[in-house]
Amino acid sequence: MNLSPPPPVVGAPHYARRWQALIVLLAGGFMNIIDISVVNVALPPLQAAFEATGSQIEWVAAAYVLAFALGLLPLGRLGDRVGRKRMFLIGIAAFTVFSAMCGLATSIGMLIVARVLQGLSAAMITPQVMATVQVIFPPAERIRAFSYFGLTAGLASITGPLVGGLLIGADLAGLGWRWIFLINIPVGILVIAAGRAVLPDIAGHAGVRNDWAGIGLAALAVFCLIFPLVEGHSLGWPAWAFAMMAGALPAAALFVVHERRRGRAGRSQLMPLELLGDPNFGLGAIMLMLIFAGSMGGFLPITLFLQQGFDFTPLAAGLTTAPFAVGVLAGSQLLRLFGDGWPRARVAIGAACYCAGMLVLAVIVSAVGDAVSPLAFIGPLFAAGIGMNFCIASIMRTALAHVPPRDAGSGSGLLQTFQNLGTAFGIAIAGQIFFSTLATLMAAGSARHPAYVAALEAAFIFNISAFAVVALLALMIRPPVGGGRPHGQADAQSAPVPAEA
């Protein structure tokens, strides 16, 4: 295997084994997505097993995505420096080890710590996936390659709840929910073996350095905002919770000032602010944050509604929500009909489709009495899934179109940082709305079923509003430059040619 990458060659062909490499890269991304979706159906059994509080069970989900979000920028930048294949494989190995730690956890505290470490290892993997695709595929093939991200997300969304439900229900060797983490061990070993064989060796940029002060400021801003959102309702909203959230703004402002100073001095930045100078990139980051906040803000409450409110098994809950993932899969195929054009229309139609589906579901839920019909969920969730895929694939493709190869890791890492901040916000905000509404109604003497119905309806307001804002923001997307030239054309000549593995 040739480990020394050649210098950039203008006009040279792209990596010959790029489609094989894409399969391995998507498998790594699949592990991350499935670990988020599979945990949703396991939250009620986990809460019962450890006698956990509502905020503790929120942290099982939120700790992962928060650590993931915090790690994406620095670890994406580190991949730019040391090489993306190396970072990807180290990340898969670490993810496998910490999945085992999750599966062997003996307390809720140990599980939350393991989830933090698992999230950090996932942050080693994910930026390398999109950054590598951006380099090894020519512009004409990138829209097709990016469409497979939606396909993978759909498969993971389907597989996670179903496999999770089957494993928990089977209770193999008496391990129950632990199998949802232990199953990552053989998968991780296979991905490492395949990655060593087919991933290209792309030269790192030795001049890139991590911005440690920037990492600290970014982490402080995010932690000050997320921690009180998750813990506030269970502690009765003490004054320090509001003070922490207020402190997130100056921390974020200091981060921006610091990054600008480093940029003016010609030093490596954790978040290259010139990327945000591209209107489509900055807009795409905001829309991704809203999309994932809204999506997680809908599905965490739905899972709790079905399992805790109406006694669905994890498998039954997974089957009930599966039409959403089928819609994501269908959306990835429909998206190909649009080619590389109409970015505004794709995002606006997708967001509107999601809103319509969830509005219909909200009406259905409002009429629920003492029983829930899974069949009633099929149409609304399928439509919402199609809309979700239209939004994500189109935004990712448009936002990354003009990111230079040198900043591919930090650019994709930045987008996914906003995406995972959105997921953390969605868990925290929707969890706050759902649990607060439920607690208020139960304290007032409401019966269980009406209380859960009202709590889910309240959470849906946040969920639908987030996508409604995305539909409006889509109108601000700028069309491709150069008279319809495919996105990414400008950077085609500057991409380094990866060495054959």
Image (tube, grey):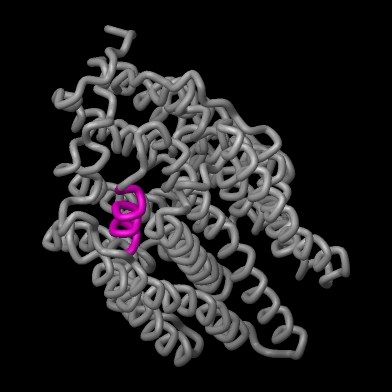
In what quadrant of the picture does the C terminus appear? top left
Residue extent of the magenta highlight: 391-401
Q: Nearer the viewer, residue 413 or 156?
A: 413
- Residue 314 in sight: no
Q: Is residue 497 above or below residue 222?
A: above
- Asked if residue 327 lies in the magenta stretch, the reply is no
Rendered residue at 35%/71% (across/down): 474
Residue 437 figure quarter: bottom right
Q: Residue furthest left?
A: 337
Instruction: From the top left corner, tell me how far across and down residue 316 is, in percent.
Output: 41, 64
Instruction: From the top left corner, tell me how far across and down residue 124 is, in percent.
Output: 50, 32
Q: Is residue 454 above or below residue 69?
A: below
Q: Residue furthest right?
A: 239
Rendered residue at 72%/50% (across/down): 254
Q: Residue furthest front?
A: 264
Rendered residue at 28%/32% (across/down): 135
Residue 100 figure quarter: top right
Instruction: From the top left corner, tell me how far across and down residue 365 is, in percent.
Output: 45, 85
- Asked if residue 393 lies in the magenta stretch, the reply is yes
Q: Nearer the viewer, residue 26 or 397?
A: 397
Rendered residue at 41%/26% (across/down): 84
- Residue 14 in sight: yes
Q: Is residue 370 left or right of residue 447?
A: left
